[in-house]
Image (spheres, rainbow, N blue to C red):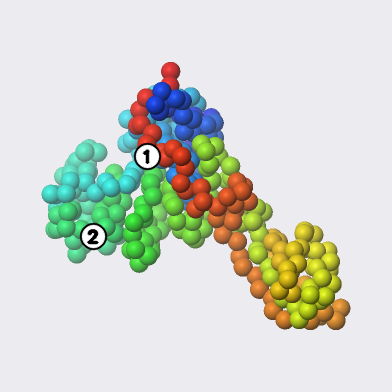
Amino acid sequence: MTNEPIIDARSLSKRFSVNKQPVEAVTDLSFTVQPGELVAFLGPNGAGKSTSLRMLTTLIPPTSGSARVAGHDIRREPAAVRRNIGYVGQLNSGSFAQRVRDELISQGAFYGLGKSQARRRADELIESLDLAPFAKRSVQQLSGGQKLRLDVALGLMHAPPLLFLDEPSTGLDPQSRANLWQHIIDVRAQHGTTVFLTTHYLEEADRYAERVMVIDRGRMIADNTAERLKAELAGDALRLTFTSQGDAEAAASMVQRLAGRPVQTHQDHSLRLTAPDGARLLPTAVRELDAAGIRVDCATGVPPTLDDVFLSLTGRTLREADAPEESEAKIPMEGPVK
């Protein structure tokens, strides 16, 4: 058994020509993913997420750089890469006229599975992804959430070690999103599948991903666990309120000493700061202030989000950045600048 990463990207770059002008969609992208990881790839529209996935899944060639995916070179061995990955893009859902089980069996045949093997595999996935009530329905009769579960099943028919998910829950209601995620987690636990996904839902990445990578304007700007990113780049938002402005001013210097970072005072007799590990700092500050005779009327702490991380990295929130001048959707699938 090799310790080789299941994804090993080295200086991947992709340049397109849009209206005769060069567009750097992805620049110098380097990272590794180990077998079994669940990695979230975050960024606003046009940041380079989908272009990166298209390169890694051999749908488009890189302008420069290299990558090995599932043990194979994306340039020299694209067919081998595709045999060893599953890819769930947006609006896949197979042939609308086909029945669900038949569509899965056809997908198995495409990957070279024999009839009996394809049937067994289809039935396994129908069971694990809770598609049994819909197995005899045509694809066009499925709801949005059911179609997405079918897409995941189609991507897993050949039992790939690596599954790419490109915004798998976009457009779903909260209950359908939670249901889809539970199925993804269950399938991963059963088969040890590596999952690499893009998503616009930051709370999904925060809750489910073991590792979060952030891309902006085609460049990787962060790569760590969600907890570390939030602690090191954002921190808890703390607010302490007092009975008078004098108490707030007196408390500010003490809290600043404890936190080791700037504290802002406000005219509503409060002081505010952002600090890592604020859940520990807040009770300590309240005790010390009380011992000094300064009474705290109210103390609150709000944990950071991944949007706070993006704000810290770029000076804007991910939602503010989500309306770029040039969306990836407008970038052609092919046509690198020569």
Answer whether labels 1 and 2 touch (C-beta < 8 Å).
Answer: no
Can I make out residue 114 in this image?
Answer: yes
Identify which amino acid the numbered label 2 is placed on.
Answer: Ser
Horizontal and vertical percent for residue 185? 40, 58
Horizontal and vertical percent for residue 149? 29, 56
10 Å neighbourhood of mark 1: few (<14), some, or many (≥20)? few
* SS class, disc 2: loop
Is 103 placed left or right of 315 in the picture?
left
Is 273 placed left or right of 156 in the picture?
right
How far apart marks 1 and 2 lie (CA) works out to 25 Å
Horizontal and vertical percent for residue 72? 41, 31
Q: Given the current orientation, which residue lies at the most extreme front position?
A: 267
Asked if residue 6 is positioned above or below residue 183 in the image, the reply reads above
**Label drawn at residue 172:** none
Asked if residue 253 is positioned above or below residue 155 in the image, the reply reads below
Question: Label 1: which residue?
Answer: 329
**Label drawn at residue 143:** 2
10 Å neighbourhood of mark 2: few (<14), some, or many (≥20)? few
Residue at figure coordinates x 47%, y 42% from the top left: 324
Horizontal and vertical percent for residue 322? 47, 48
Identify which amino acid the numbered label 1 is placed on.
Answer: Ala
| Quadrant where the C terminus is found in the figure | top left
Residue at figure coordinates x 38%, y 47% from the top left: 165
Residue at figure coordinates x 39%, y 50% from the top left: 167
